[in-house]
Image: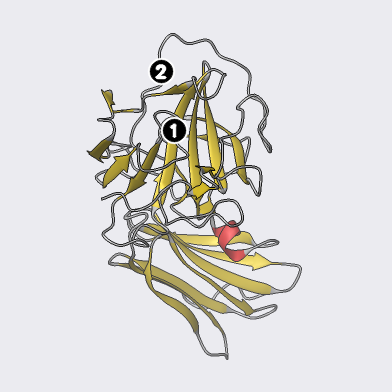
Amino acid sequence: MVLALSAGLVGGQAAWAAPDPNDPPDQVDVPEVSTLAAPSFQLPFPCGQKWTGNSSNSSAHQSYEIDFNRGSTADADLGDTVVAAAAGTVVISAHQGSTNGYGNLVKIDHGGGWTSYYAHLDTRAVSAGAAVKQGQKIGTVGNTSKPGNNISPHLHYEVREGTGYPSNIRKATFDGVTFGYPTATVTSKNACGTTPANPHTPEEVCGSGYKVIDKAALGSAGTVYLLYNSGNGYNCVATIKATSLGTATATSAYLEVQGKARVTDSGSFTYYAGPVRAAAADKCVRWGGKAGSAVYDSPFEHCG
């Protein structure tokens, strides 16, 4: 069941209109590449997930836009992973403010005049100008919009070819099959034959100034990293998962400075455990972590 509308009515009119693709805010330019066919789009969700889309529930829809939900309650999909429907270059990654009702928007240029839009995101995982692969995480399902426009969490998705909104909106296709307008339930085949990369790095998790000084593989399930910040004398440990990405699984990271109590971050996490930080200038440290059934425990080392 589709639970959310992309926008409500304000004074009997649609609460927002989508921006002109020729001159939207926050957009970076990408050179035009000629192509004779549309990209091979896949459902903008991880492999195997089943989502129900609806093109007619919103008064703001102009053509073939789709709102996606899969949960049985209004907030069930909040925070679910959204991935790129096809490879391309991110040309917008920004909150649209009062400009329109998109809220947190990611727009991807696929070349040949083809673009895809991912709106109302709770979080954005990519920046404008970044190259993305099909199936790469670009954000999470949310309910962001313009001030005063209260909506339930869902993904607003659309594909455009060329310019001249709204006539440039095209019917969505997933795995070569046209979406069954106005409502259909689709199972994602996005990146099913590949292992997606974790969008998070140990440097990002630990923060500015931290550099990797050691690491240990946790089988195929992930890697635990030891980092050091020479500016403040702190060590940091982060465990970055390599499998079951986007699914909460047992993961941990710990750091023990010699002579002090161990600090641990342990639980069921979707992408990483940590950061675990401690002052360790001129001190030996013991560090390690767990992902899946694999565990790493270091001796006291890196003494100084």
- Find numbered disc 2 in the image and state the secondary structure of the residue it sits on: loop
**Which residue is depicted at the point 56% across and 45% down?**
101
How far from the left and from the top, in percent, is residue 33?
56, 14
**Residue 265 sits above or below residue 119 on the image:** below
Question: Where residue 187 sits in the image (x, y, percent)?
Answer: 23, 40
Quadrant in which the C terminus appears: bottom right
Residue type for callout 1: Glu
- Which is more foreground, mark 1 or mark 2? 1
Seen from this angle, which residue lies furthest right? 231
**Depth check, front residue: 273 or 223:** 273
Taking the image as shown, residue 200 lies to the left or right of residue 269, namely right
Residue indicated by mark 1: 158
Q: Is residue 67 above or below residue 260?
A: above
Query: Residue 128 — which label?
Result: none
- Which badge, 1 or 2, is on the more N-terminal residue? 2
C-beta proximity under 8 Å, tags 1 and 2:
no
Residue 106: image x %, image y %?
54, 41
Tell me the residue at 76%/68% (across/down): 231
Vertical side of 156 occupied by 286: above or below: below
Q: Secondary structure at mark 1?
A: strand
Residue hosting label 2:
38
Question: How much space separates mark 1 and mark 2, taking CA atoms?
Answer: 14 Å
| Amino acid residing under circle 2 | Ala
The quarter of the picture where residue 45 lies is top left
Q: Position of residue 95 (x, y in %)?
A: 62, 48
